[in-house]
Image (tube, rainbow, N blue to C red):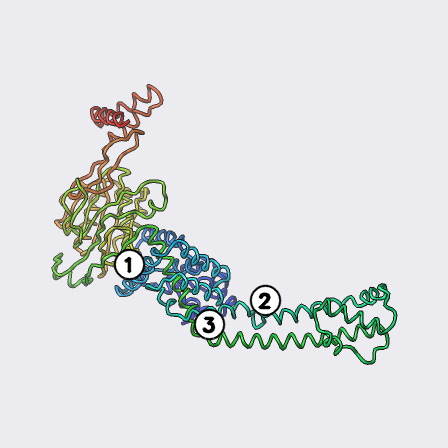
Amino acid sequence: MRLEEYWGVGPKTRETLVDGLGAEAAVEAIESGDVRALVDAGLPRGRATRILRRATGGEGMETLATSDARAAYKELLDLAVEHAVTERAADRIRILTPLSSREAMAERLDAVLAARDAWAALPEGDREAVLAAYDRYDEREGSELAAVEAALALAEAGVDAGPFAAIADLDREALAEAAAALSALDDGRVREGADEELDRLRDALGTVEDVDANALNLIEELREDGVRDVAGFRDAFEDRLVADAGVTIDRVREAIPADATDATDFVGATLRGLRADLTDAVDEREAAVASDLEATLADAREAVDRAVSAVDEIALHLSLARFALAYDCTRPTFVETEARGASDRASAGTAREGRRAAVSVVGARNLRLAASDEESVQPVTYALGDHAVDEVPDGVGSAPGDDRVAVLTGANSGGKTTLLETLCQVVLLASMGLPVPAERAAVTPVDALVFHRRHASFNAGVLESTLRSIVPPLSGDGRTLMLVDEFEAITEPGSAADLLHGLVTLTVERDALGVFVTHLADDLEPLPPEARVDGIFAEGLGADLELRVDYQPRFDTVGRSTPEFIVSRLVANASDRAERAGFETLAEAVGHEAVQRTLADARWDE
């Protein structure tokens, strides 16, 4: 495949990649999802990531039918990246996409959950040792030595489940010997400290070279010490070399010339001969040591190669396992379904016999809120379609039926948008083969995820662009999930109600699943029988006049915005008498008695 055929690779990007990597290596980097290689070649990390997402998971990216769905997807990846144990693992997480087959989803779930359970069972000290090994692996940019050391750390920790099994059955003794050999070799040269005899010879050679560079000074020192005759000079010179360089007297005498004419010639010739002899000795010893080390590596090559491959793969699953542990994520259940073609729909109408599709959660938590640590997260239970929600929290009505579409109503700041976002997160994580933040979840992977956040732009252009993004996915033959927030915010209320009713009806007719958040529920009647209305309720004001909301939707119940709570807070917080009088006029409009009762309840809470 040519570089230009990859999504996002135009002439300029191609030139950058060819200059930095070469065409063949660039194709290999794209096919293997190597973010670092593309970044090192000169691409911005964001662009490299986008290219690789399309190259390695283009079909999955097509699932994200709206910009808000893509934004939610990127937010999830950012949260997961925070738990990556290496930069390479972080890069691999950034290019994860929704998977196209149930088998691939299940396979990744198995690996991540096995890694999660194994990691959770490790003592803290073993976890720290593994993470420290991965830190070194990162610092050395994934070198063979760092990979082998990380493999040994994992083996020492005793983890052998799931993806860790690839390390557990490696020959630990062979890996340890390989690690010693790799640490001793540096591009064919033997590092200092690897062999005592080689170090001694190198030290001797270095000393002789230093003496040679200062030969005249040495001659002068010996003369100042009172050495005058030839025999005495020779003995003093030999003693100095033996003492300073650590060489044997025999090695010194073998280097002494037989025909030196004076002291300078004698010292210079001796030092040159000694340097040549020591250089040969160093080269010979280094070659022998390197040969032994390379033989050790050759014997352990299979184990080393398996360790390099396994450590990188384990880093990905371990990173995802730590993410799952951080947010107490669990395995979703995949609900079987088959997408029905347009001709089938035309002949069968909206009948659903034999079809099972669902998005349901029990005790689900919003990851964005959980990560912020700014507020406690109330778990919620919610369901669409053929689901496994057989019991719900007290006070929210009976368990929901098999309605495939819901209209969600209720108080401002009541968590309606957060619920949509939570459902979106659960579906995205499940489709990527990752655990989800819920006690239980049942999910039908979809072909199109339409997530539309509330956008407070009121003009014809926004309305048209919104309809262009959310309606076409319903027109295809695949499975679609609609999560639409306050559609009425982009057009006038009368038209909004008509259009929203049409969207709900279209969602039902196309056998899709959907949740539509709105304040216009009363204007949507009558809804199709496959749709229901749920509500979120504000419960009053707390001691600090904060709005108290039960974020758990009540099924088959229209929620109310309860403006008296907001007006009550404004009355209580008015800065002067005139301002208070103005807000009390609004209190009369929304129900003065209700406002006074709210204020009384808030004071009682104090």
Q: Residue 184 appears at what percent x and percent y? A: 55, 69
Instruction: Answer whether labels 3 and 2 touch (C-beta < 8 Å).
Output: no
Q: Is residue 238 above or below residue 483?
A: below
Image position of 383 (left or right of 275): left
Q: Amino acid at mark 1?
A: Ser
Q: Amino acid at mark 2?
A: Gly
Secondary structure beneath dot 3 equals helix
Q: In the image, which disc is placed on residue 24? A: 3
The residue positioned farthest toward the right in the image shown: 228
Label located before the other in sequence (1 or 3): 3
Label 3 Cα neighbours within 10 Å, binned few <14 / some 14-19 / many ≥20 = few
Image position of 373 (left or right of 141): left
Secondary structure beneath dot 1 equals helix
Label located before the other in sequence (3 or 2): 3
Viewer-closest of 445 and 492: 445
Q: Is residue 479 above or below residue 393?
A: below
